[in-house]
Amino acid sequence: MEKTETKVSLKKRILSINGMGQVLTVSAGLVVLCIVFGIINPTFFSTRNIGNLLRQIAPFILIGIGQSYVLITGNIDLSIGSVIGMSTMLSATMMTKGVNPWAAVFITLVACLVVGVLNGYLVAGFSIPPFIATLGTMTIARGIAQIANGNYNTNSIGEAAEGFRNFFYYGKTLGIYNTFWIAIVIFLIFNFYLSKTKTGRHIYAVGSNINAAKLSGVSVTAVTIKVYVVSAFCAALTGFTQCASAGMGAMDAGNSYEMYAVAASVIGGVSTLGGQGILFGTVIGAAIWAVLQNGLQFAGAPVAIRNIVIGIIVIISVLIDIIVRGRAPKKGAHKKSK
Amino acid sequence: MADSIVRMEHISKSFPGVKALDDVSFELRAGEVMALLGENGAGKSTLMKILSGIYTRDAGDIYLYGNKIDVLNSKVAKENGIAIIHQELNMCQHLTVAENMFLGREIGKGFLIDKGKMNEEAEKVLSSLHVDISPKTLVGNLPVSKQQMVEIAKALSVNARVLIMDEPTSALSSKEIDDLFVIIRNLRAAGCGIVYISHRLEELSHIVDRVTIMRDGHFISKGNFSDYTMDSIIADMVGREIKEKFPHVDCKPGKTIFEVRHLNAGRMVRDISLSVREGEIVGIAGLMGAGRTETTRAIFGIDPKESGQILVDGKEVTINKPIDAIKHGIVLAPEDRKKDGLCTKLPVKHNISLPNLDLLSDKIGKVSRGKEDKMTSDAISNFSIKVASPEVAVANLSGGNQQKVVVAKWLSRKSRIVIFDEPTRGIDVAAKVEIYNLMNQLKEEGIGVLFVSSEMPEIIGVSDRVIVMCDGRITGELMRGEATQEKILTLATHFENKFEEKGEEDGEN
């Protein structure tokens, strides 16, 4: 279908996508960042590092996608990091106890999705502010992560889990780590879901104006539950990659990842006020986050300096966008006129 | 002799791609109410934003109290006593009346606030306006009309001498409008100059002294209100004569297609029974807070119903959620387009397709781009929505065009019953006529129309039958021809005895 279109109209169509402008600006920023790091340390561009980098980007893409879904409805999910911990610990504990790894994955996935359903139901069904509702489930999920193996990290998940470890972390397909492929497949599926389907439209509508959405026949509760389930699903997958990477379960896995997810989304142009943003932006945002981590490490910056620099860059990147779009002066004038 | 306190001469202002004002002059005298009239986009608001210092002019001179003012920013405007009361009120809902009035210039010593003094001062201003509001009330607990009075009081407490009111009555009931007019007359007597912007031409005769009319960024005419007729005002605003302000099409109404029986839903919807026939426009008249909007909300499944039946084509249907109503061919174009009607951040295209996605998507829920583009372009041309591209966010459209998007999104699917709740609020005369024509078009297609409006002339002019509500009940029904303003008003104030004894209570939220 796509091929019958002329090239020009395809280009036009892509450019006309709401928010694409900002994503292109951010993409340019990503290219500049890579060049700068490449100049500082040429091994940044080595095949080995590129491979590692892609694998490092993957979890940020996954959690970014989940958080973006939630942010676009005008909500937030603080439980992402804890769900990662829960996923890691539940799956690892089961594997150390001899459960078949794929059965463990399945059971863990179901448990994590329950958290997602609970989040959505609390927020939409009972109108609990999303910040509070997911703060609660965040604490609960972390508690489950801790209780899973009796308040200890697990032992090695062992030989039987070799397939699991390769699938989620160590294996390669077409020369690129599977972790990255998983992130890309998830991106393609959820990007389609968000931009091309009825539910996707409903997600934007709820974030833009919840009343208008309701009156247009949208079930706000169903939409809200769906986005939180997507978020929990992405967090669960991220948990598996962490478990596969370490070969064991760590109780504090995924700590503060919910905030990294917000960062990836916001850098990529997703509005925390809802109704705006595209997943392609989130992928670029995730890439910037990972490139900063990786590049600064290669440039020899100590962890403390890395954190400070990354923090500054997050703020600057959003600031540039606000200035470019001219939103800041308008808001200021509005306040003054009061 | 009246002195002119504001003189704006040969003002021009351009925005990227648009010349908003072209050589416009404007004058306001002390102790008068000047109506500034024009269609949406005529440049009224731009001109007033220049006067209040929000925008800067590109060219032209401004004189305040006879002094030439070179740089007019909002600080200078404030110092010169120019205050603007916006259509949408800017109040902190969680602060008290006094705190709002003194926001940014709190009375007190150092960083301590003297609440008592502030309340006292606020009380003084409020009582000078004969407004009975306690300065300690939270603004959020006041009805919109009272909030507006607080806003006026706030302006006066900084010694405003020029008050610009942008559509001040659009959210008020008749009684509240009367109260507002009393205040405006008091201000005029006190020597203030008032610029009054309104689309409700009927109300001008009650308070306006002079008129300035603009069109497409140009000054068209000015003069004493008494020298104009309604028709000459409209002709100047629109640039052509509008032959029929309320076009009406005669249709033989067919069989009853929609019936509501004994509907109850809360205090404002009590035992409502009504019916609509094929090809009929049924008006629902009443004062603000009569329960009209609540009735439409209950029918459409937004608010829960306690009891009652709804029948479409003689068959009872269950409506618990809006989607149920939509599926049975009932649609509702809601009252407040920003609050309930539109997702303003989203493109026009996505707004129009939102309630119709079931028709546009396949089994797995993928929205067909071709079908969606066709629906949107049809809607844009059918409703002559002025927009550069369907991808433009609705927020960038003018009020009239936004209203057309609300209507278009609901009429893009085949329905049996269309409910319009105040479809013409805040839009100009020409756009209003387009909406009426649209309703007539629906009627000719055999669709039943329920038309809620607070403007009596339009409800009398357009409807085939008028149902009047008061305090949550239907108090009467008038056929076309027998409906007059007096009769409607009599029915609309037909309160139950019990209610009258309790004293007047304004149930508007």
Image (tube, coloured by chain):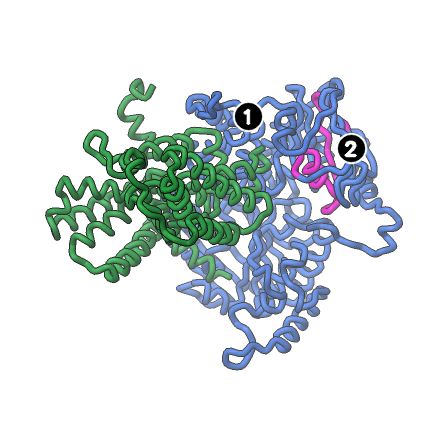
Chain colours: A green, B blue
- State which region is magenta: B275-302
Give the quadrant of residue B489: top right
Q: Amino acid at mark 1?
A: Ser
Q: Determine the secondary structure under disc 1.
A: loop
Is B339 situated above or below B383? below
Mark 2 is surrounded, within 10 Å at the Cα level, by few (under 14), some (14 to 19) or many (20 or more) other residues, namely: some
Is A136 situated above or below A283? below
Subunit ID for the residue under disc 1: B
Question: Which marked residue is nearer to the observer: mark 1 or mark 2?
Answer: 2
Residue at the image point whose x is 57% and y is 57% from the top = B85
Residue A288: x, y in percent?
Answer: 27, 47
Q: Amino acid at mark 2?
A: Gly
Task: State the residue position of label 1.
Answer: B412
Is B323 situated above or below A271? above
Residue B499: x, y in percent?
Answer: 85, 51
Task: State the residue position of label 2.
Answer: B308
